[in-house]
Image (cartoon, coloured by chain):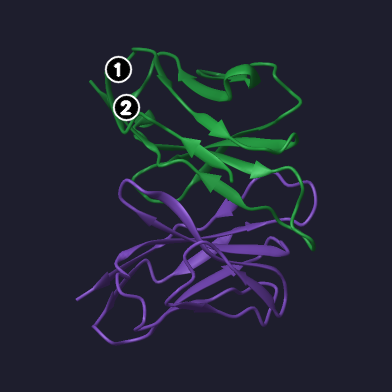
Chain colours: A green, B purple
Amino acid sequence: AQKVTQAQTEISVVEKEDVTLDCVYETRDTTYYLFWYKQPPSGELVFLIRRNSFDEQNEISGRYSWNFQKSTSSFNFTITASQVVDSAVYFCALSEGVAFTGGGNKLTFGTGTQLKVEL
Amino acid sequence: DGGITQSPKYLFRKEGQNVTLSCEQNLNHDAMYWYRQDPGQGLRLIYYSQIVNDFQKGDIAEGYSVSREKKESFPLTVTSAQKNPTAFYLCASSPDRDFDGYTFGSGTRLTVV
């Protein structure tokens, strides 16, 4: 069975600090996808990144960066120079590499990390 | 703009009542999903549908029902058999190929009064 663990329930930082959100996953699949989503107070989940299991290159997008390490089954997310607008719940998710017959994939979510960025 | 529309945003239900949550998408996605979110528990899959007129139970389907009569629509009914329905409900969709994650709606917050 697939499992995603986000051990950090809540993190509080002061603006401009760097912060890393941890994600550890379990799967028996050799092909899989990893995701990060952001959920602001409005409730809608916003897609941040997808990474497939064959691509271990780190990704950087502005102040956001992701570190994927298959050896430790981790896909950590770092926000550099955090801002108040980064305050949200962040979810890590895992999907099987083989789609459902007929289309679509099941995503297994972690329990989320609440990030609070204060002035 | 393409997206997913969930309505209503807030819903109040009396004990013993069935209520239906609406989910409509104009992204031409084949697959649609319903998730339930509770504090500290992340998102849990209720039902999913890969094509019209077909749907499958997820991890917590008891007390819920769905229909998929049109590609664009995937309504969720919370029945009186659901013992703890107060939660935040999220609808999502995805294409059948080149899976790039879900597109989510803005959610419906259901409260039992």
Nearer to me, B52 or B55: B55
Residue B6, visible in the rendered structure = yes
Task: Give the residue drawn at x 71%, y 61%.
Answer: B29
Left or right: B108 in relation to B50: left
Q: Are marks 1 and 2 on the same chain?
A: yes
Mark 2 surroundings: few (<14), some (14-19) or many (≥20) residues within 10 A: some
- Whether A3 is drawn above or below B90: the answer is above
Q: Chain of mark 1?
A: A
Quarter of the rendering containing residue A62: top right
Q: Are marks 1 and 2 in contact (CB under 8 Å)?
A: yes
Q: Mark 2 belongs to which subunit?
A: A
Numbered label attached to residue A26: none
Residue B96 quadrant = bottom right
> Mark 2 highlights which residue?
A84
Q: CA distance from mark 1 to mark 2?
A: 6 Å
Q: Is residue B2 visible?
A: no
Q: Residue at x 57, y 61 (%)?
A: B4
How many C-alpha atoms fall within 10 Å of the one at disc 1: few (<14), some, or many (≥20)? some
Residue A90 left/right relative to B29: left
> Which residue was labeled with disc 1?
A15
Above or below: residue B40 compared with residue A23 = below
For the point 58% across and 62% down, the residue is: B33
Q: Residue at x 47, y 19 (%)?
A: A78
Q: Amino acid at mark 1?
A: Glu
Residue B87 lies, in percent from the top left, at 33, 62
- The x, y position of residue A107, in whole percent, is 59, 49
Does dot 2 land on a helix, a strand or a loop? helix
